Image: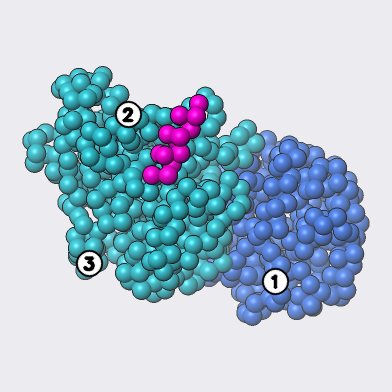
Amino acid sequence: MARNAPTHPVDGRYGAYGGQYVPETLMGALQELEKVWHEAKADPQFQLELAGHRHAFVGRPTPLYAATRLGEHFGGAHIHLKREDLCHTGAHKLNNAVGQALLALRMGKKRVIAETGAGQHGVAAATVCARFGLECTVYMGTEDMRRQSMNVRRMKLLGAEVVEVTSGTKTLKDATSEAIRDWVTNVRSTHYIIGSVVGPHPYPEMVRDLQRVIGDEARDQYLSVDGRLPDVVVACVGGGSNAIGIFTAFLDDKDVMLVGVEAAGKGVKTGQHAASLVGGRPGVLHGSYSYLLQDGDGQVLPTHSISAGLDYPGVGPEHSFLRDIERAEYVAVTDAEALAAFRLCTRLEGIMPALEPAHALHHAGVLAREMGSGGRILVCLSGRGDKDMDSVEDAARAERDQ
Amino acid sequence: MKTATGSLEQALRATGDLKLVAYMMAGHPNKRRSIEAGKRLAGSGIAALEIGIPFSDPLADGPVIQRAGQIALEHGMNVAGALEVAAAIATEGVPVVLMTYINPVLAYDPRRFAAEAAQAGLAGVIVPDLPVEESEPVAGWLRAASLDTVFMVAPTTAEDRLASICDRSSGFVYCVTVTGITGVRKDLPPGMKELFGEVRRHTQLPVAAGFGISRPEHMKSLRGVADAAVVGSAIVDEIDRGGDPVALIKELLKGCR
């Protein structure tokens, strides 16, 4: 199935990006992880086991869905949605968590830690830990625990300990820092399941390898439905795992445009956003060199997005590479635009998207209008929107009060 | 003022007594008071002083140093300001080593950072999130400016990496005694003697112990094992509470002899 063999990373790098900027204490664990991952990837037994869990536990393959009413609304273009919202637990995050849990078992590590923003990765980690009998601790910022309270309850029911992170911006960035500090302290007994294509090598590569199933499936499905490929593939980008997951299968299809959609928050010009590739410059955060929202002194800036899953100042190093070589294009979509797309998709398709892919849906609409009735657009619908009810209602209330 | 190459190495080599290295954060609780604290520490009998440059996301630091960094950042501290703080303290004659995460250095420009640190009379630089594999070209600029490049070994460092870490280190080798982040601990872990013994097989440089060290009895247990001990969080905590870190140094020095 993996027809495209990605050319990167080379020595842990995607062009200038990536690397392993971590305390010495973690270097041994990263080297072990790289070795174990490459062995597992080449092991037919591991792949068979992973495929079995993907099928019966995650619910793969997820469908490719023709969003005809959205297409009509935007002027007649063909819009297809890759339904990662139909994965067990409600988002693509489980693809990665299942693979890494199998890896933790392979390494004999009984404890798992994870960071979470929207809570979807935290829920995925807690879910696989319940399934495979692993101890689970999830780090989550105070602010995110408030706006994603349902996911906090889910994690606790699944048996995970949720540790509230009160430092810094109290969101995903600080939850990630705290998870890394836990890992530095407990590295011998603990596997850290990073939720996105970020962090030190080999995480961006390993998470991509586990998420590329999205694009591998979608490409086959698209071809079998239409006999040809889409003109453009659109996905939201926080750390960027669903985007890398769907882009990877299309990297060699030079005529297929790849577009990553970041969170413009209240507008990139206001400074209250989370668009690292659109509004940042390269730097080091959480172990890798990549585009980063930082001030002139190299201090990481606070971010804003209505979507907790995109509210992160960094981005995966492979996206930085794809941006620089101009294989993918990156744009930013505001809170208000994402909310409008959320409502539109809910009303026209009966599919309530998470606020994260609602950013991608808005941009798909922009592209559809540009391309007209011949346009062929594939969108990664990375997760479902139940978790965002409070945020959407709060936003509606704020609009009414204005 | 330019520190002669080798001064850090000389200052930290144990001579019967264990040498003491103090850590403080530039700009904590503010710029002026951090210079005052540094000058007092410089004259307190320590062998060298580490000065931290604050960073928004310090992955290797526990709550005390995180908080000090946050306060320093809120008071506008940055690389340029920290170089001024360090330069003012270095005039007291104690070897000064900067401890900084890599991103502020990259943002400042590593070449300019190295040149200005040397100009300020500083002895060396420690970057806790820059393992040897990632250390060039930054380490090259530091060496070119005759600054010592101090790398860390940890209890989890494999034998095959020890040689390259020790090779690239100058001034001293920083041996992280605990598997974890900075912050005071009641007891130091067992197995330290073995770790230091292993490190010494790969280097003639002085070997300093750091992380978790805060008490005179820790000093006693490190005497004859390490050349020097680095005390950070305990000193930063004392400064944070408006206390006198020199009194703490005097206590710790008793354990060094």
For badge 2, the amino acid type reads His
Can residue A150 be seen here? Answer: yes
* Chain of the residue displaying label 2: A
- Rendered shade, chain A: cyan
Q: Relative to A207, does residue A279 appear above or below in the rendering?
A: above
Q: Which residue is mark 3?
A: A49
* Chain of the residue displaying label 3: A
The reply to whether label 1 and label 3 mark residues of one chain is: no
Q: Marks 3/2: CA distance?
A: 37 Å
The reply to whether label 2 and label 1 mark residues of one chain is: no
Res. A51 image quadrant: bottom left
| Main secondary structure along the magenta-highlighted residues | helix
Residues marked 3 and 2 touching at CB (< 8 Å)? no
Q: Is residue A254 left or right of residue A309?
A: left
Chain that is blue in the image:
B
Residue at (32, 34) in percent of width and height: A343
Q: Is residue A51 left or right of residue B207?
A: left
Callout 1: SS: loop
Callout 2: SS: helix
* Residue A65 rendering spot, x and y as whole percentages: 17, 40
Q: Marks 1/3: CA distance?
A: 43 Å
Q: Which residue is mark 2?
A: A363
Q: How many residues crowd around disc 2 within 10 Å: few (fewer than 14), some, or many (20 or more)?
A: many
Callout 3: SS: helix
Q: Which region of the structure is painted magenta? A: A389-402
Q: Is residue B248 left or right of residue A224?
A: right
* Chain of the residue displaying label 1: B
